[in-house]
């Protein structure tokens, strides 16, 4: 079975509509036909300051939402990145093969470091290298993400090829899996900006865990464009075009069919129906998330099982990597604990 891997950061109390349509929905679909590995990337989250208590809580919330959205632990491997230490070990190795200039060209680093200013960490700079390690450890063929991750995926491909060329075939060169129609969902208040956990205003972003009333209010206040025609036109009507794409992704109807349905009806009826589509999708996810979060030990068991399965694959790849690059193998019968100095 071909492999798929993806990750999501536990940096908010809820995923948003962009995360859901751009990534998570594909994760759910792909678990049926791929050997799928999905992780909550807590080590990526700490590239900017995080409150420790909140990070723990949000890691569980993230995992619960993924299960509630349809990930099935019997069909995929769901785990927390920091539970598999090979991620950081491989990131070090790959970091030693990444050019400083090459890493400096990452646009997400430029954007984010611009925002955090003097607080910019080395971790934020090497973030894409850790992401490459996440992917390459599992020899993933496909990586489902939104458009904003395309450049990071390109770096992962370059590093896989570079390693294979220098040390012999080891890694699979991964392909981005990006669905054009939902690759970039825009902010409801500013249709020129990506809907984003870190930069959208609360009114610009729909959270998977928003209550139905909040969803209805945010959609009714979403900026639409001049005129009253429900018509996709990226240049003239970016707000309506974004809403049409969301409607189409949720309902499965082509954009043209939705345009035809609301011809002459104005924005009001269209937005009302769109809000109901969102409520129908998110209300059950919200309820299931709350139910899963009510039993933390059960959730932790799912994550432990995931880490066990992921750890096996990661350990195998890491052994191959250590051998390839010439690190002296540790003698198993003389493991650290077996020959520890007496206290
Ligand atoms: P931030 O913008 O604050 O860095 P984020 O909202 O992009 O965070 P991530 O955890 O970085 O959230 O992204 C998780 C996944 O969701 C990634 O695959 C990313 O490409 C995808 N994604 C994020 N925002 C959007 C969006 N607006 N449209 C489509 N996909 C998105
Ligand atoms: N950088 C990604 C999150 C991420 C990821 C990954 C995605 C970390 N590791 C591996 C795909 C594969 C983001 O969404 N900002």
Image (cartoon, rainbow, N blue to C red):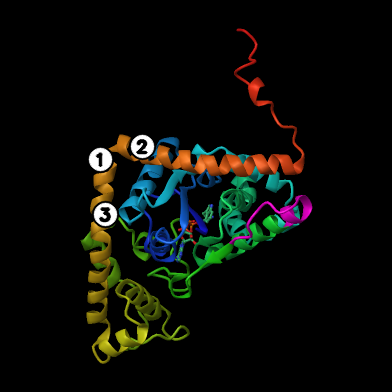
Residue tagged 2: 301
- Neighbour class for label 3 at 10 Å: few (<14), some, many (≥20)? many
Question: In this view of the protein, which residue sits in the foreground, 142 or 183?
Answer: 142
Q: Residue furthest bottom?
A: 264
Q: Is residue 332 visible?
A: yes
Which of the marked residues, 1 or 3, is nearer the chain's N terminus? Answer: 3
Question: In this view of the protein, which residue sits in the foreground, 54 or 26?
Answer: 26
Q: Secondary structure at mark 3?
A: helix
Range drawn in magenta: 162-174
Up-down relation of residue 271 to residue 118 (above or below): below
Which of the marked residues, 2 or 3, is nearer the chain's N terminus? Answer: 3
Q: Measured from the top left, where is residue 289 in percent x and y?
A: 28, 49
- The residue under the point 60% across, 41% down is 316
- The residue under the point 74% across, 36% down is 327
Up-down relation of residue 50 to residue 169 (above or below): above
Kindly indicate the quadrant of the structure image that contains residue 213: bottom left
State left or right for residue 146 relative to residue 223: right
Asked if the residues shown at circle 1 and circle 3 are in contact, with their CB atoms under 8 angstroms apart, the answer is no
């Amino acid at each position: 079975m071909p492999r798929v891997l993806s990750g999501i950061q536990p940096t908010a109390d809820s995923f948003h509509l962009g995360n859901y349509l751009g990534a998570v929905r594909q994760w759910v679909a792909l678990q049926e036909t791929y050997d799928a590995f999905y992780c909550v990337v807590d080590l990526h989250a700490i590239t900017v300051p995080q409150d420790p208590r909140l990070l723990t809580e949000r890691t569980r919330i993230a995992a619960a939402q993924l299960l509630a959205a349809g990930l099935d632990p019997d069909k995929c491997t769901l785990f927390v990145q920091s539970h598999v230490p090979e991620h950081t070990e491989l990131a070090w190795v790959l970091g030693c093969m990444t050019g400083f200039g090459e890493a400096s060209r990452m646009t997400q680093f430029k954007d984010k470091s611009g925002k955090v200013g003097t607080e910019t960490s080395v971790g934020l700079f090497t973030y894409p290298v850790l992401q490459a390690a996440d992917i390459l450890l599992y020899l993933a063929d496909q990586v489902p993400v939104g458009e904003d991750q395309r450049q990071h995926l390109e770096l992962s491909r370059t590093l896989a090829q570079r390693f294979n060329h220098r040390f012999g075939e080891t890694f699979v060169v991964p392909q981005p899996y990006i669905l054009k129609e939902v690759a970039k969902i825009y902010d409801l208040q500013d249709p020129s900006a990506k809907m984003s956990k870190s930069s959208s205003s609360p009114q610009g972003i729909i959270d998977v865990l928003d209550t139905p009333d909040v969803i209805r209010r945010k959609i009714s206040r979403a900026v639409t464009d001049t005129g009253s025609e429900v018509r996709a036109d990226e240049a003239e009507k970016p707000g309506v075009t974004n809403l049409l794409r969301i409607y189409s992704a949720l309902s499965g109807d082509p954009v043209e069919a939705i345009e035809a349905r609301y011809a002459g009806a104005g924005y009001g009826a269209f937005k009302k129906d769109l809000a109901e589509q969102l409520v129908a999708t998110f209300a059950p996810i919200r309820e299931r998330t709350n139910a899963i979060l009510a039993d933390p030990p059960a959730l932790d068991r799912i994550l432990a099982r995931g880490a066990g399965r992921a750890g096996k694959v990661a350990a195998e790849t890491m052994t191959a990597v250590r051998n390839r690059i010439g690190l002296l193998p540790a003698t198993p019968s003389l493991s650290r604990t077996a020959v520890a100095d007496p206290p």
